[in-house]
Image (cartoon, rainbow, N blue to C red):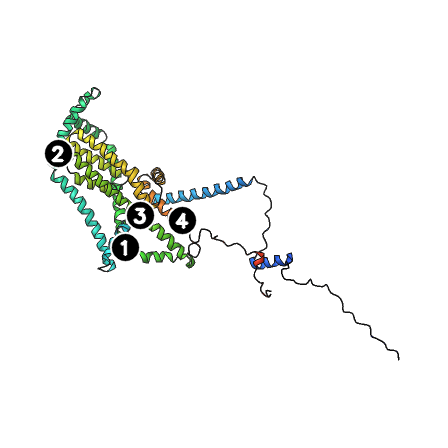
Amino acid sequence: MAMTADAPTVAPTTAAEPPTTPGATTPEPVAEQVLEHVAGQVPAQAPPPSTFGAPWIRSAGEVAWKLVGIVAAVAIVFYVVGLIQVVFVALFLALVFTTVLLPLGDFYDRVMPRGLAMAASLLTAVLAVGALVTYVVSSVVSRWEDLAIEFATGLTDLAGLLTGIPMLAGIGGPDKWLEDGGAWLQSHAGDYAGTAAQSAGSIAEGATAVVLAIFCTVFFLTQGGRMWRWALDFVPADRHDRWEAAAAAGWTSFSGFTRGMFFVALSDGILAGIFLSVVGVPLALPLSVVVFLGAFIPMIGPVAAIVISVLVALAAKGPVLALVVLIGMVVVAQLDANVLQPLITGKQVSLHPVVMALVVAAGSVLGGLLGAVVAVPLTAVAWAVYCTLRRTAADGTPVAPDTPAVQDAPAVGATPAVEGTTAT
């Protein structure tokens, strides 16, 4: 019997998949898909070549536009400050008063409620300044008659000294000086009337700024933390730590500037008192108090203290001692400006003495006396805030110097498993 065998059924062939071996490299299309899934974007492609200039020209253009933007922002700030100058001065003074009185208020806070402690610190400061001014005025008034007689004698001696010089023989004596001075004042009475009215307006603005500063100081001392938390609510919650760190750095720098100014003024007063006592000028201690108070007013304060000291020396001891006092007080002023302020204040605000000198000069050119006063503390605060923000991550934690702020994309060999697949 013949046996028939069925033909073997051949299954349709399909493309054989390459065997997967350990360590095999993933094909290129799959690697691109994995990168797209992990990074969430198409792999970066090389930018098309630019046809406008060399790369350094494009970089210089970007830097130039950034500088233009910075200059425009600074100009707007100066313009706005000029419009509300009284408010700006009051706020600056309030911050200075708060910096000085806060440690004293914290000391009083140990034995009395917070609000009463801050009020007591403010009252202590007012009494201290009033006591110094009262001491100076009472010392001068008690010797006013003697100083007037000595001043007339000093003027007579000065006139005799000057008339002995051939070129100055015709200047006359004190009587002729007073007569010529009165005639000059009469001829310029109209100009001085306008200047006096303008000065009265400036004095009124200054008084307004001081009253407003004291008013703000009271609230800064008693409710400063609550006011800061209210302002911080306008910032996203994830940025609170960064703002807290920046504000702390700025406040520390501003407090250091204020402490440095106090130490510089105290040093000036001590040096001036020692010098005036050694040369024999009367009222040496009251004059040292005047030097101490004048040191808080840049440019005007030291000059006024020198003029008052020279006049007292001229009235008491004559023109020779007055010249000695003039030279000595100028040396003290130069020591203050070129040694004490850069060393003490510069160390407190972490600014180089050269930077401080340039900042004060620029502030004087741009804002006059006010610019010279606020230039150093504002620069110090801005620098401290910038350095803090640069060293702080977005979540408020410090970033190590060798840790990049933005992490690089993971390497292909370390790519995690794609969702829906199983890592082998």
**Mark 3, secondary structure of its residue:** helix
Tell me the residue at 11%/32% (across/down).
149
Residue type at numbered disc 1 = Leu
Spatial CA distance of label 3 from label 2 is 43 Å
Identify residue for label 4: 387
Spatial CA distance of label 3 from label 1 is 18 Å
Identify residue for label 3: 256
Residue type at numbered disc 3 = Gly
Identify residue for label 1: 221
Q: Earlier in the sequence, mark 3 or mark 2?
A: 2
**Badge 1, how many Cα within 10 Å: few under 14, some, many 20+?**
many
Q: Is residue 411 above or below residue 289?
A: below
Q: Nearer the viewer, residue 155 or 183?
A: 155
Q: Earlier in the sequence, mark 4 or mark 1?
A: 1
Q: Position of residue 311 (x, y in %)?
A: 18, 33
Spatial CA distance of label 4 from label 1 is 27 Å
Q: Looking at the rendered structure, which numbered label has been put on residue 148?
A: 2
**Mark 2, secondary structure of its residue:** helix
Q: Earlier in the sequence, mark 3 or mark 4?
A: 3
